[in-house]
Image (cartoon, rainbow, N blue to C red):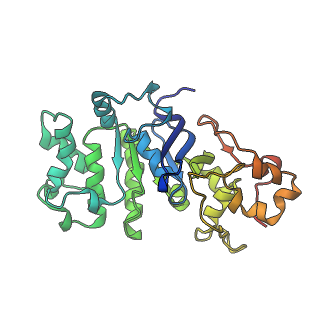
Amino acid sequence: MSGAGLRAEGVHVGFPARGGGGVARAVDGVDLHVRPKEIVALVGESGCGKTTLARTLLGLERPDQGTIYYDDTPLSYSSRALSAYRRKVQLVLQDPTGSLNPRHTVYEAVAEGLRIHGGVADEQAAVADALSRAGLRPPERFFLRYPHELSGGQRQRVVIAGALVLHPTTLVADEPVASLDASVRGEILSLLLRLRDDLGLSCLVVTHDLGLAWNIADRVAVMYLGRIVETGPVEKILSAPEHPYTQALLSVLPDATGGAAEPTVLTGEPPDPARIPAGCRFHLRCPVLASGAADAAGVADQCRTVDLEILSAEATSQVACHYARVTAEPARPV
């Protein structure tokens, strides 16, 4: 497997389970590729492992198995190598209020990254350029403002400017609009699209919201219990999802069912990542299995006992679902 950009290959990340019993497999075998000038949405419920995967891609967590690649070069975890890497791959947090020091001006917040990484010849020009690219114009008007003097959307733009000041090639945005009013979300998503088009940036957007993915992503990777279960171009995933989990996430979006069906309500909580079930890891909550459709298709036993392979990051479109693979039509809950 090869390719420029940011890539995870066979990545596993575990943590001690609560109560000291075993290992919680937060990321349990993932291939993922964010190509140059591409926006990928990593989608799933809270606790599915997507934030841990994002932290691993940023070099903040070290995988137990597998490798992170940047432009085909394996990530090194020496201090010097990580410092150079983080100039190229920058994090954008979901809570601008929490990520901005209330005692620092906008100028100081944006300049902080430059100072950590060695500075530039003209710091003021670099800060002004980053603020301008983030949509805060004229930038000098914001230099001496403090976070509490800004709107939520302006604070998020300051956070984005703090990433842009280092001229990265890739942004990892963890729920970048979750804390913003609906009226401001579209502005920030439009900004990320402009940054891709104007600067050639690629972006991994971590979100629980498939609607956000529809508005911004080129490709979607759907994650459940530590593993990617469906991936493909956004138009394909959101117009003809094959995995019952993807369908359930999509069904709760406004107008997703076109008024023809009720949203699919998943029963129970995802299993404990320290006790991942045999077979398909979604089978305990799968509405297709519960409906008897998997029995009718002759795959119910496989759903309960046969694990599915790790999906390849290089495939155009893939699904990890026994039922979807043996039926001509995508799996629809009955």
Residue 40 x %, y %:
50, 46
Does residue 193 sit above or below 148 in this rendering? above
Locate residue 206 relative to residue 307 in the image: left or right.
left
Q: Measuring 66% from the left and 56% from the top, which residue is drawn there?
A: 239
Residue 230 x %, y %:
64, 48
Q: Measuring 87% from the left and 52% from the top, which residue is drawn there?
A: 298
Locate residue 306 relative to residue 194 in the image: left or right.
right
Q: Measuring 38% from the left and 70% from the top, which residue is drawn there?
A: 181
Q: Measuring 56% from the left and 40% from the top, which residue is drawn there?
A: 30
Does residue 1 sit above or below 229 in this rendering? above
Depth check, front residue: 130 or 160: 160
Depth check, front residue: 234 or 230: 230
Locate residue 112 relative to residue 296 in the image: left or right.
left
Instruction: Point out the image quarter for the N terminus.
Output: top right
Q: Using the rendered image of the protein, determine whether residue 134 is visible from the camera's viewpoint.
A: no
Q: Residue furthest front?
A: 20
